[in-house]
């Protein structure tokens, strides 16, 4: 169910700024899961725990969830640490390209598409500017491409920012 038609246009920084300015997806009718507030109760939301390991969709890469900054995530630029291992060998994956695509499925829009930098420890990667431009339910799809891995692997991690 869609919340309203105020938030259907997608992509483009100008459009996004416009949406943020008018407060897209405001809780006009209050029925359905797509309201801004209360996503902590949303059955799609998984609690975020540092140290949890998640296997990528292609089962090639193991993503270990690292610290968030701020923790919990909030509206604005967010930092996120992630470690990558080869699922087959458990070896840290270095030299990878790791990107994040935040998306609000209930509003049909994203924000930015940042790339992580490699940390000092082998296999560690850091995002500094994942832009959660509004409160609500977000899905962040990670995509990783490594010299030691045969194909791109992806993983979706979801977050709730209480409005
Ligand atoms: Cu939105």
Image (spheres, grey):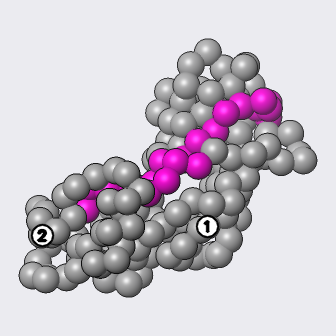
Which residue in the structure is indicated by mark 1? 78
* Dot 1 crowding, Cα within 10 Å, few <14, some 14–19, many 20+: some
Which residue is at a point 62% across and 60% down the rendered structure image?
A: 129
- Residue 106 included in the magenta stretch of the image: yes
Which residue in the structure is indicated by mark 2? 4
Q: Quadrant of residue 40?
A: bottom left
Secondary structure of the residue carrying tag 2 is loop
Q: CA distance from mark 2 to mark 1?
A: 27 Å
Along the line of sight, the residue nearer the viewer: 43 or 15: 15
First in residue order: circle 2 vs circle 1? 2
In the image, residue 94 sits, relative to residue 38, either above or below, namely above
* Dot 2 crowding, Cα within 10 Å, few <14, some 14–19, many 20+: some
Image: magenta residue range: 91-114
Q: Is mark 2 within 8 Å of ligand 1?
A: no
Left or right side of 58 for 127: right
Left or right side of 132 for 125: right
Along the line of sight, the residue nearer the viewer: 59 or 115: 115
Left or right side of 108 for 144: right
């Amino acid at each position: 169910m869609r919340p309203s038609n105020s938030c259907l246009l997608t992509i483009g920084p100008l459009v996004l700024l416009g949406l943020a300015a008018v407060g897209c997806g405001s809780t006009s009718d209050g029925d359905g899961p797509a309201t801004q507030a209360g996503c902590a109760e949303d059955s799609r939301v998984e609690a975020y725990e540092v140290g949890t390991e998640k296997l990528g969709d292609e089962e090639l890469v193991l993503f270990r969830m690292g610290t968030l900054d701020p923790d919990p995530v909030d509206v604005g630029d967010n930092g996120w640490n992630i470690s990558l291992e080869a699922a087959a060998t458990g070896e840290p994956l270095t030299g990878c390209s790791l990107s994040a695509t935040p998306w609000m499925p209930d509003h049909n829009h994203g924000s930015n598409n940042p790339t992580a930098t490699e940390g000092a420890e082998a296999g560690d990667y850091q995002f500094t500017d994942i832009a959660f431009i509004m409160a609500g339910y977000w899905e962040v799809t990670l995509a990783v491409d490594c010299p030691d891995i045969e194909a791109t692997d992806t993983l979706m991690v979801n977050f709730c920012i209480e409005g």
